[in-house]
Image: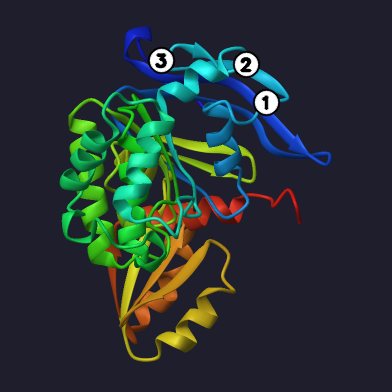
């Protein structure tokens, strides 16, 4: 897979051939990637694919077994302390103090980072993220969406140059997710670089660029449109009666690689357009259902790439 070279001055993350194993199993294999400054970079992949391990290597929390690279211009092998000073890392689990209020948590974080005026810094974060009405509420009493907003506030308190967000909106309602992403875009517009792992396709589509990693291997990189186009998937959308039986029949045909119901329609996908058309020609000619050309989606690509990958822990 060819990766376009980015001018050095525009690069926030530049790593090559990163490999990390646990108990003899490679969790990340020969990973090479570049992330441009000021972009929101989506990191996609199934559970156990190496996303969290990669994030931890990038910010100096894990040392790769092999490979090299820089994060914000600092060497990931020798300058981990410097990297940590400039990176905000939001983990999957809520990691602030449940028995402290929002205000107390943020003031504590500000003191940990030795900010000159912890109270003012905490108040600025509270105002920015719309937490004023809940500032004195205990963190442990917050819903998932408010906890994530608090965690984001803690991450941006020391004014990092890079945000690493590990599935930040898992289990959060759609309104809270949209508000969270609006703030992420605002931060990116102010020059912050964001690398975010997610399973949500609508979130991936809000990223400037995405990368797909499956069981340690980086399989696709680019904009959403580039990744979809690069998959070369052909798609038919079928409506009408008897879709359940049709789906069972289609799954037995060579040239049909994916069949998925979407509401009152069926998406039929193939990696080779001609083979897909040949396999479905008789069914399309029968007139039992209505067949229309469709466009492959990012979810189609995600599932296709996942199907081609081998679980390294299987």
Label 3 belongs to which residue?
Answer: 5
Give the camera-side residue of 207 and 5: 207
Q: What residue is pinned by disc 2?
A: 77
In this image, 30 relative to 10: left or right?
right
Kindly check if marks 1 and 2 are in contact, taking CB atoms under 8 A apart as contact. yes
Residue at 40%, 91% in the rendered image: 242
Alpha carbons under labels 2 and 3: distance apart:
22 Å
Q: Position of residue 11 (x, y in %)?
A: 37, 16
Q: Is residue 306 left or right of residue 164?
A: right
Residue visible at 31% across and 68% down? 173
Q: Earlier in the sequence, mark 1 or mark 3?
A: 3
Q: Is residue 135 above or below residue 208?
A: below
| Residue 78 higher or lower than 19, as above or below | above
Q: Quadrant of residue 89?
A: top left
Q: Quadrant of the C terminus?
A: bottom right
Q: CA distance from mark 1 to mark 2?
A: 8 Å
Please state the horizontal and vertical placement of residue 99, each as a whole percent of the image: 44, 60
Q: Earlier in the sequence, mark 2 or mark 3?
A: 3
- In x, y percent, where is residue 284? 36, 75
Q: Which residue is mark 1?
A: 64
The quarter of the displayed image where residue 229 is located: top left
Q: Marks 3 and 2: in contact by CB < 8 Å?
A: no
Q: Tag 2 or tag 1, which sits nearer the N-term?
A: 1
Q: Among all residues in the image, which is located at the extreme right? A: 24
């Amino acid at each position: 897979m060819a990766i376009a070279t980015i001018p050095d001055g525009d690069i926030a993350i530049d790593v090559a051939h990163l490999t990390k194993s646990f108990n003899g199993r490679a969790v990340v294999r020969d990973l090479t990637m570049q992330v441009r400054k000021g972009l929101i970079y989506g990191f996609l992949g199934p559970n156990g694919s190496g996303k969290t391990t990669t994030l931890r290597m990038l910010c100096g929390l894990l040392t790769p077994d092999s490979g090299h690279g820089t994060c914000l211009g600092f060497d990931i092998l020798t300058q981990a302390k410097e990297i940590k000073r400039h990176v905000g890392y939001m983990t999957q689990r809520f990691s602030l103090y449940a028995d402290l209020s929002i205000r107390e948590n943020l003031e504590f974080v500000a003191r940990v980072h030795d900010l000159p005026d912890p109270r003012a810094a905490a108040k600025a974060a509270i105002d920015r993220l719309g937490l004023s009405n809940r500032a004195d509420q205990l963190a442990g009493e917050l819903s998932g969406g408010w906890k994530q907003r608090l965690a984001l506030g803690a991450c941006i308190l020391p004014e990092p140059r890079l945000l690493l967000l590990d599935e930040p909106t898992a289990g959060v309602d759609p309104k809270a997710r949209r508000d969270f992403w609006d703030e992420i875009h605002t931060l990116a517009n102010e020059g912050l670089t964001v690398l975010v792992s997610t399973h949500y396709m609508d979130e991936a589509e809000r990223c400037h660029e995405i990368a797909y990693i499956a069981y340690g291997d980086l399989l696709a990189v680019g904009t959403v449109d580039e990744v979809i186009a690069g998959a070369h998937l052909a798609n038919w959308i079928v409506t009408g009666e008897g879709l359940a039986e049709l789906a069972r029949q289609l799954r037995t045909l060579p040239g049909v690689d994916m069949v998925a119901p979407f509401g009152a329609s069926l998406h039929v996908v193939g990696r080779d357009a001609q083979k897909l058309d040949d396999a479905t020609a008789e069914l399309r000619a029968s007139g039992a259902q209505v067949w229309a050309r469709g466009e492959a989606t990012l979810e189609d690509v995600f599932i296709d790439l996942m199907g081609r990958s081998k679980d390294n822990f299987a």
